[in-house]
Image (tube, rainbow, N blue to C red):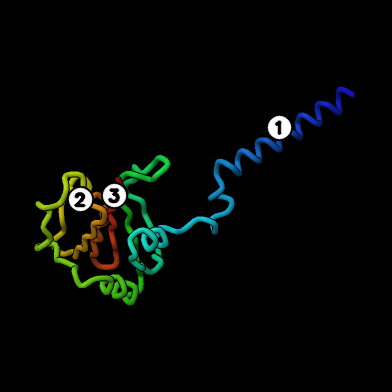
Amino acid sequence: MFKKQRIFMVVIMGFILVAGYVLTFPQWLFPGLYPTFVETIESNWGLSLPPPEKEVDIYNDRGGFHGDGDAITELYYNNESDVELIKALSKEWVSGEKFETESLPERVLSLIKETDKDASYFFLQESGFDYIILELKGNKVTIFESYI
């Protein structure tokens, strides 16, 4: 009888551990259920970016329930047509030499430390506080994003 109780307890503990893992890290087991970074940008900002060849998170302090905070992500593209699609997102791209940082909020300046004169910039701000900046240089798009 004692042996059956031990086996039952081990099976129950194993089930609890597996269930806890699935509930804690569901995106690892079911990645198709979660949007990609590019899909999130389209949903939040209405900007349709092509899927990148490579995505690198540079900085991310967006935590909590609402996802407030700042993030910097680099997207790399191999196809020139993808870069052209990004350029076509807006007619408001500004060269790095003409991109005015003085009028940007202080918290934006804390992320975008300096501008690159060889890059192009696109700034979009919504609801007074949330913003996104796209820096395009060659085949790399650096996205500076903040939500409050």
Q: Give the vertical position of 20 relative to 36 (above or below).
A: above
Which sits earlier in the primary sequence, circle 3 or circle 1? 1
Q: For mark 1, does the 10 Å Cα neighbourhood hold few (<14), some (14 to 19), or many (20 or more) residues? A: few
How far across and down, in percent of the image, does residue 34 sit?
A: 50, 55
Residue identifier under label 2: 112
Marks 2 and 1 sit apart, C-alpha to C-alpha, by 49 Å
- In which quadrant of the rendered image does the C terminus lie? top left
The quadrant where residue 22 appears: top right
Q: Is residue 101 left or right of residue 126?
A: left
Q: Amino acid at mark 1?
A: Met
Residue identifier under label 1: 13
> Quick one: SS at disc 3?
strand
Q: For mark 3, does the 10 Å Cα neighbourhood hold few (<14), some (14 to 19), or many (20 or more) residues? A: many
- Res. 49 mark: none
The residue at the point 19 percent across, 68 percent down is 93
In this rendering, which labeled residue sits more in front, label 2 or label 3? Answer: 3
Q: Is residue 76 left or right of residue 98?
A: right
Residue identifier under label 3: 146
Q: Amino acid at mark 2?
A: Ile
Q: Is residue 10 left or right of residue 141?
A: right
- In which quadrant of the rendered image does the N terminus lie? top right
The quadrant where residue 66 appears: top left
How far across and down, in percent of the image, does residue 123 sit?
A: 21, 60
> Quick one: SS at disc 1?
helix
